[in-house]
Amino acid sequence: MTDELDGQFAQWRGYVKQRRAVSEADVDELEDHLRGSVAQLMSVGLRADEAFLVAVKRMGSLDDLSREFAREHSERLWKQLVLSGEPQAPAAKGSRRDLYAMLICAVGAAASIKAPELFGIPALVDDHDTSHRQFWGLNASLFVLPWLAAFLAWRRRAKPVVLVVLVALFGLGVVAANAYTLDDNSQSVVLTGLHLPIALWLVVGIAYVADNWRASRRWMDFIRFTGEWVIYMALIALGGGVLTGFLLATFNAIDVDPTTFVVFWLLPCGGMGAIVVAAWLVEAKQGVIENIAPVLSRLFTPLFTAVLLAFLVAFAASGNGLEIDRDMLLLFDALLLVVLGLLLYSISARDPLAPPGLFDKLQLGLVVSALVIDALVLQEIAGRIADEYGTTPNRLSALGENVILLVNLAWSAWLLLGFLRRRRPFESIERWQTGYLPVYAVWAWVVVLVFPPLFNYR
């Protein structure tokens, strides 16, 4: 079997394992049947890719799972081979077991955010005591992300070794958030509060890909999951805001003030639970043919490309230098992170077998524009460090992050150019992005664990 064919089998297996009614033994049996069919077809002279497509076609007439697999990849030849003349099957119903697991984890997250109050640590919103604000800022993600990882690990039937890794990494996060004695004005407080959630979110990614962590496509699925999770969280937040407004208005109409309940219970507990609920919603819609990723990526990629190009043209025409204070640095870094997220989201939503087109050229323009802006920002940061300002935790953190982004964007641009010139397959871009994810995780852990003692906790 060729590497390409093995990749096809791995992708097919990963998809089938996501079906709720299929056990691991069922997947093994289906794959053995499929491999046997492919081997038989290859023995009579078919190429590997032809044999795979024909075998999926034959299996589709026997098993609805294969038809769903073909339907999920609607842009590929499998759709014509398997779905030709067949009505589309309804979306799979949500599993009660998944629902119960989600509810347990959501309730656990909601209860965790209130647990510190049992040990004398007041709620974050308690204006009468600000001495524990640092605790909440550093530990907020630790109250919910382990529960989210637990739900995903349960969904993926994670092996014991994966569970051990998850527990160890979340334990390391607890140490990073609480082991150092930091002054409230320390820059390390802000840096840890920003970087620890990033590091722990990539730990959640390990739980998400626990069923096939070696496959780059599974990591791309996690990237798409992240984007759709953000969208669901935004929708839940909007709905929650409307619900809260109605609650306050209706109770005030009968001269009852629910503010204490809303502020101390509904918002913190509901927010923590919503993080798990949003993940469950993303998982529950996997059987839908079309997802929101291609729509959003095709909408915002041209818009962001136009904005970045307009900025670069204005910068060149004005002749003014780039002056960046702390707030502007945060703004530019946020912009670059959004561009990177949009690039990852677009890659995760794209059919890797489709030929290069106009949208890929727009993506190259977006990446090159972001690359130039990142180089300008990096030059400004390096200049400030080299001049009279010196090195601080904030500046070194920003320098490292922009160097990491520069490397990623530069090689991404090169790979996209090679793909547009039909010299590289699209899979090379996927492999680069998924292979680069550990770099972000390592840097986040370095900032969280190494920076405080390195800069004498200032």
Image: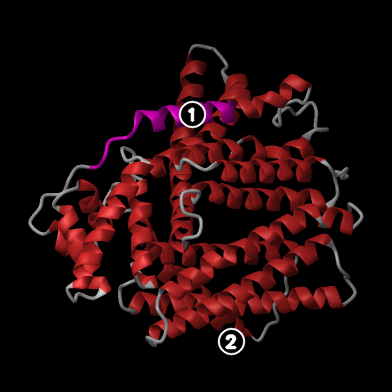
How far across and how far down the image is residue 45, in percent? 18, 76
Quadrant including the N terminus: bottom left
Which is nearer the eye, 31 or 170?
31
Which is nearer the eye, 59 or 260?
59
Q: How many marks?
A: 2
Name the residue that disc number 2 marks: 317
Q: Residue at x 52, y 71 (%)?
A: 432
User: Between disc 2 and disc 1, whose residue precedes?
Assistant: 1
- Is residue 60 depicted above or below 410 in this figure? above
Residue 272 falls in which quadrant of the image?
A: top right
Q: Report the span colored magenta.
A: 91-110
Give the Cα separation between the discs numbered 2 and 1: 48 Å
**In this picture, residue 121 sits left or right of residue 201:** right
Please tell me whether mark 1 sits on a helix, a strand or a loop. helix
Bin the neighbour count of mark 1 within 10 Å (Cα to Cα): few under 14, some 14-19, many 20 and up.
few
Name the residue that disc number 1 marks: 245
How far across and how far down the image is residue 284, in percent? 36, 40
Please tell me whether mark 2 sits on a helix, a strand or a loop. helix
Q: Residue at x 20, y 65 (%)?
A: 40
Which is nearer the eye, 20 or 266?
20
Please check the rendered image and state whether residue 441 is part of the magenta-colored stretch, yes or no: no
Residue 375 falls in which quadrant of the image?
A: bottom right
**In this picture, residue 126 sits left or right of residue 141:** right
Q: Work out which residue is located at the far left of the displayed protein and give it.
A: 85
Q: Residue at x 41, y 77 (%)?
A: 362
Report the magenta stretch's main SS: helix
Please check the rendered image and state whether residue 100 is part of the magenta-colored stretch, yes or no: yes
Bin the neighbour count of mark 2 within 10 Å (Cα to Cα): few under 14, some 14-19, many 20 and up.
few
How far across and how far down the image is residue 116, in percent? 72, 26
How far across and how far down the image is residue 322, in percent? 70, 77
Q: How is the image coloured?
A: secondary structure
